[in-house]
Image: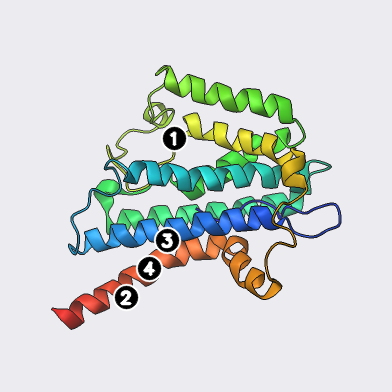
Amino acid sequence: MTKHIGHPTKQNSQRNITLDMTRTLAIVLMVIFHFIYDLKLFGWIDWDIPDGQGWQQFRWVIVSLFFLALGSSLHFAYASSINYSKFLKRVLQISAGALLISIASYIAIPSNWIFFGVLHFLALASIICVGFANWPKLSFIIGISFFILAASDVLISRWPFHLLFDGLPDYTNDFVAPVPWLGMVFLGISLGHTQWLKRDPLQGKINPAVLRFAVWPGQHGLMIYLLHQPIMIALLYGLSLVIS
């Protein structure tokens, strides 16, 4: 869960505060989710996270916020034209982060390593969806179609990876199914075209001093995504040594 391709801007070159705050909310919820997961990892709680009732839905809320923001960002950043140099640079940054996550998880938890998690999805979704940045109605239809396709059980959740690779783990600590979640990015593109979001409803509604602090996570999501888990695990491990 991370900073997205491109920086959405209003026509007056100001950032869209509502999108930044959406990312910040998603990041805060993500950190809370992972912190509780880490508490379970260290044996301090026995809650059924991440797959138990309520926790799975909590994760759906988090990724939905990220993916809607990604789609809207693609519209704001690339509806008029695509800066391919900037776009490619950002995709490569996210892809490098995804590769790092895969390698680290394979070393740490080889039986459940992350072969296609949030960062992998963001890179792929950006490439697939950027060409639709200025097609709100078509994006909406495609987005709904992805969810209908998923609900029909025509494709299994691990599609297409079960067709492409042998030996992938049966369970992975972070997996984002392209169907239906690509649909949420397409819906985000459609949302980005709405006058409600273009008017930026949070613009001017938050104290400037508070705003600078509040939007910072939303503007540095990739860094936070890569660093928050190692930091929290290290702190909890240190605490476990102290209290043991």
As drawn, the label of residue 31 is: 3
Q: CA distance from mark 4 to mark 3?
A: 12 Å
Give the side of residue 217 with respect to residue 107, left or right.
Answer: right
Marks 3, 2: nearer the viewer: 3
Marks 1, 3: nearer the viewer: 3
Q: Which residue is mark 4?
A: 230
Point 63% across, 63% down: residue: 219
Q: Badge 3: how crowded within 10 Å, few (<14), some, or many (20+)?
A: some
Looking at this rendering, what residue extends furthest in the left direction?
Answer: 244
Instruction: Say if 31 sits above or below 180 in the image.
Output: below
Q: CA distance from mark 3 to mark 2?
A: 14 Å
Secondary structure, mark 4, is helix
Q: Of label 1 and label 2, which has the lower sequence position?
A: 1
Q: Badge 4: how crowded within 10 Å, few (<14), some, or many (20+)?
A: few
Q: CA distance from mark 2 to mark 4?
A: 9 Å
Secondary structure, mark 1, is loop
Q: Which residue is mark 1?
A: 177
Q: CA distance from mark 1 to mark 2?
A: 31 Å
Q: CA distance from mark 1 to mark 3?
A: 21 Å
Q: Of label 2 and label 4, which has the lower sequence position?
A: 4
Amino acid type at image mark 4: Pro
Q: How is colour applied across the structure in the image?
A: rainbow
Q: Which residue is mark 2?
A: 235
Q: Of label 3 and label 2, which has the lower sequence position?
A: 3
Say if mark 1 contacts mark 3, CB within 8 Å.
no
Point 43% across, 46% down: residue: 117
